[in-house]
Every structure is written in C-alpha cells, then in structure tokens.
Image: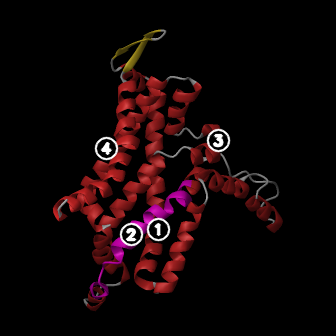
Amino acid sequence: MNQRDARRLSLILLFMPFALWILLLILLPHIGMGVLSLREKIAPRQYEFGFANYIAFFQEPIYWHIMTRTAVMSLIVTVLALLVGFPVAYYIAKIAGPRSRGALFMFCLIPLWVSDLIRAMGWILLLRETGVISGLLQWSGLASEPVEMLYNDAAVIVGLVYTVMLFMIVPLTSTLEGMDHSMIEAGYNLGGNGFTVLRRIIVPYAMPGIVSGCIIVFMLTAGSYLTPVLLGGKYSSWFTQTIYDQFITRYNWESGAAFGFLLLIFTSLVVWAGLKLSGQSLSSTVARS
C-alpha cells in the first residue's frame, strides 16, 4: 500500500463514524417516518398510500393552532435567550480575562450536567405552591397565602430559556472573539456613543453568531417535550405533546409521523424566513460561528 492509498484509507476511516451516524440515526429514521406518514388505514391491518394524515392536520383547527402557538412561544424564548445571552457572551469574549472566561463557561455548562427531567424538577421545587419562592414571598410579607407559579406560559418560558441559554452563548462568544478591539475604539473615536457602537459595529459583526444561536435555540425549543409538559401541565398545548399523544395515547403512528414531519417543515420554513430577513446565508453563518 502506497502513501496515497494509506491517506485515502485514513480519511475513509475518520469519516466512517460520522457517515454511519448520519445514515443510521438521521436519514434512515426520517425515511421510515416519511413512508409511515403516507400510510392511510382503510381497514384493520390494511393500508394504502396517500396524504390523508396530512389533510387531517389542516382540517382540524386545534392542530395548526397548537403548532402556531408552539412557534410563537419558541420565538419568544429565542428572543429572551438572545437578550440575556448577548451581554454574557460579550463579557466572556471581550472583557473577561482568560481565567475568568473559563470559569464563566463552566457556570454556563452547569445546567447541562443534569438531564432535562432534573432541571424541570428543580424549577418545580422553586415555583410550586409550597416551593421556595412562594415560601420567601410569604415570609417577607409580600404574599399572605401560597402563590402557585407553575402550569402557565411564564413558567414554561423561564424553564426553556434556562435550558437553551448555553446554545445561544457559545456561537455568540465564538463570533465576538474574532472582532478586533480596534473596531470598537474606532467607533468611539469617530464620536459614537455606546448605543451607536453597539448598533453600527458590534451587532452587525456578531450577526452570524446571532443567527446561528437563534436557529439552534428555536429548533431545540420547538422540539422540546419534557419541560413544557412538566412546567406547563396539561394546559401547555405544545405541539410535541400532540405528536406524543398520536404515537402513545392513540397509537396512531401514521398521524404521529405526519405531524412530526409537519413540525420539521414548519420550523425549517421559519428558519429560512429568518435567514432571508437577516440577510444571512446558512453557509456563512456556520462558517463565522
């Protein structure tokens, strides 16, 4: 075996795990779900191919109402994560020293050390009627009786923002680290104030990281299941819960597969619209962040 063949073999071996991961865990399951979503049940154990499962979604207003509500809530979580995460990312990238930068990243990683279930249970302990926050409000005299803060949209949004914050901070920090300090100094030297420098220099430079973080956060939020169910209760009306009900409660795998594909298509369209409105492309966003 010559050197060229050895390099080619090494490249194939390095690429093989990634190719198998894409094929076995992404492509094949999606193909199987796509075929399953096109099956129409006409009799017990008798199926034919068609679009009845997709048509049923559009004929039932409650389904697309829940999907629209999920999209709106996901956008709210994305905006809040951006507003909270951008100052943190800027401080880590441009102000903090090397040692404190590592410590701050470690604090951001702490929520990912435990599962979604443990994180949601932590918020339940804080927000429930007999929880920590309710007890503090009563102890301080701000409330005369227990305060229930669970099972509403605010609790779901807080829990989701806490869960996805790191996925907003990392691409923002990666992008802002490449910005030269002289650009900011030039903005001030030309007479700009802090808001002008932020609007005309920092935000445009960080736009690839902003778009990348928003895409990741929006997709993760729209596809979240455990946090909306535990913090929102039976009134959470999250679309992933509708998909779960089709699969598990009704044992209607055909409709569940169709609803899953509709959620994927809808969120992809929202991401595409966001890229067009921001003037960014997916390739440049990934390259810069």
**Label number found at residue 233:** 3
The quadrant holding residue 130 is: bottom right
Which of 93/69 is in front?
A: 93
The residue at which mark 4 appears reads as 269
Report whether 260 appears left or right of 192.
Answer: right
Q: Position of residue 50 (x, y in %)?
A: 33, 18
Residue 178 visible, this angle? yes
Mark 2 burial class by Cα count in 10 Å: few <14, some 14-19, many 20+: many
Report if residue 71 lies within the magenta region: no
Q: Earlier in the sequence, mark 2 or mark 3?
A: 2
Q: Position of residue 285 (x, y in %)?
A: 28, 62
When the figure is inspected, residue 125 is found, relative to residue 141, above or below; the finding is: above
Give the distance between the C-alpha atoms of the residues marked 3 and 1, in whole angstroms: 27 Å
Which of 227/130 is in front?
A: 227
Mark 3 burial class by Cα count in 10 Å: few <14, some 14-19, many 20+: some
**Label number found at residue 85:** 1
The quadrant holding residue 229 is: top right
CB atoms of marks 2 and 1 within 8 Å? yes
Type of the residue with mark 2: Leu
Report whether 263 appears left or right of 154.
Answer: left
